[in-house]
Image (cartoon, rainbow, N blue to C red):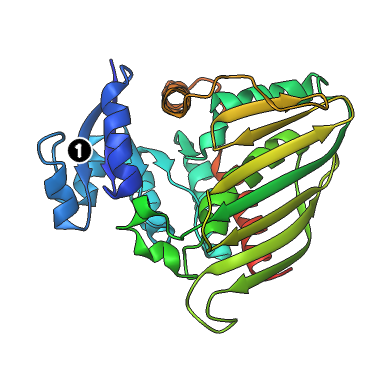
């Protein structure tokens, strides 16, 4: 029997997952809801639109929570009360005390629960981690994370303008968090050594960051992050793990490349559509394992809290 999935939040990401869940043989989307009536109307022909969020929680075996982070706690609480499994968007939250309480609540519930960091199961991340663990790169010397966004929010985030504001948005929380999750998985727990962040409208404004630098340490190797937004040019998302025998990097989210000193070589292909589909399919495959009670590679709530702590410390410049 397929897992009965409900979706709360039908914005950019939630809409994408309506399609992904519908296409996956292990899932049946039984209900969805969004606080915006227009978002609900856009999906009325593809999924049952619930009366409210509680209707979704009660109809499903597990709920995908795809709302902005300020509202995660509300719907996680509802799932715990109903005994419904949880698949929550990242970042886990923006208030650390609230997120710590959320982790404790979820862990005590014993419910299947995970956070949607794409590198929990994307083939690029899985292969990179396996190659590092097997010693194929030699001794790990350092890691570098480069981020640049010509515009923020990006064009496809047009309906998610909350991403412009520092109370819960910004590309550090939205994008860098994915890569810090993966870096923790590859290098081990990270600690922030130093950080400098510039905000678009100054220290006391409301708008999110426009540049950030940070240095993290781990028991394996340091990680240096440089991120910027604004200015013409292609977006950059590039995590490089550099070893004594070779290096590998993830670029454009899903491409995995390697080098032993010459040009970069693609290891998994270059077709972004195919690579993206493989990543989504792998993520939902791992979610199915979680709901079956089997071992899986998805990010736990504790994993997500550790990443949130790093991001929030970076935003504070310490």
List x then y, in percent, for residue 201.
Answer: 53, 80
- Specify the quadrant that holds the N terminus: top left
Q: Dividing the picture into quarters, in which one does residue 42 lie? A: top left
Q: Secondary structure at mark 1?
A: strand
Residue at 74% across, 68% down = 318
* Residue for badge 1: 31
Q: Dividing the picture into quarters, in which one does residue 163 lie? A: bottom left
Residue at 56% across, 32% down = 120
Q: Nearer the viewer, residue 261 or 114?
A: 261
Residue at 59% across, 55% down = 308
- From this view, report whether residue 239 is shown above or below residue 217: above
Q: Is residue 67 visible?
A: no
- From this view, report whether residue 140 is shown above or below residue 318: above
Residue at 87% across, 24% down = 245
List x then y, in percent, for residue 68.
Answer: 39, 57
Dot 1, crowdedness within 10 Å: few (<14), some or many (≥20)?
many
Q: Would residue 263 be found to the left or right of residue 173 on screen?
A: right
Q: Nearer the viewer, residue 214 or 22?
A: 214
Q: Dividing the picture into quarters, in which one does residue 292 lie? A: top left
Q: What is the tally of numbered marks visible in this picture?
A: 1
Q: Nearer the viewer, residue 282 or 261?
A: 261
- From this view, report whether residue 13 is shown above or below residue 311: above
Q: Is residue 116 visible?
A: yes
Q: Nearer the viewer, residue 279 or 298?
A: 279
- From this view, report whether residue 274 is shown above or below residue 201: above
List x then y, in percent, for residue 235.
Answer: 53, 49
List x then y, in percent, for residue 17.
Answer: 32, 36
């Amino acid at each position: 029997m397929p897992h009965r999935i409900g979706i709360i939040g039908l914005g950019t990401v939630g809409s994408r997952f309506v399609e992904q869940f519908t296409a996956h043989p292990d899932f049946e989307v039984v209900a969805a809801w969004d606080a915006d009536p227009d978002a609900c109307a856009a999906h009325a022909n593809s999924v049952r639109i619930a009366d409210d969020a509680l209707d979704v929680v009660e109809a499903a075996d597990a709920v995908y929570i795809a709302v902005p982070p300020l509202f995660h706690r509300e719907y996680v609480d509802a799932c715990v009360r109903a005994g419904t499994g949880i698949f929550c968007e990242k970042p886990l939250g923006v208030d650390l005390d609230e997120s710590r309480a959320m982790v404790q609540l979820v862990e005590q519930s014993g419910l299947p629960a995970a956070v949607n960091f794409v590198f929990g199961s994307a083939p690029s991340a899985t292969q990179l981690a396996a190659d590092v663990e097997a010693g194929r790169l030699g001794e790990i010397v350092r890691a570098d994370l480069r981020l640049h966004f010509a515009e923020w929010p990006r064009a496809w985030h047009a309906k998610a303008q909350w991403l412009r504001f520092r109370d819960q948005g910004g590309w550090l929380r939205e994008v860098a968090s994915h890569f810090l999750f993966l870096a923790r998985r590859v290098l081990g727990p990270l600690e922030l050594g130093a950080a400098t962040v510039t905000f678009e409208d100054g220290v006391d404004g409301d708008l999110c960051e426009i540049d950030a630098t940070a240095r993290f340490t781990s028991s394996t190797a340091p990680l240096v992050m440089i991120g910027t937004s604004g200015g013409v040019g292609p977006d950059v998302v590039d995590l490089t793990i550099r070893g004594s025998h070779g290096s590998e990097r993830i670029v454009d989210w899903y491409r995995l490349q390697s080098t032993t000193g010459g040009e970069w070589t693609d290891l998994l292909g270059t077709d972004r559509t195919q690579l993206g589909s493989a990543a989504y399919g792998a993520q939902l495959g791992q979610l199915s394992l979680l709901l079956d009670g089997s071992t899986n590679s998805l990010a736990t709530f504790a994993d997500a809290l550790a990443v949130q702590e790093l991001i929030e410390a970076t935003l504070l410049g310490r």
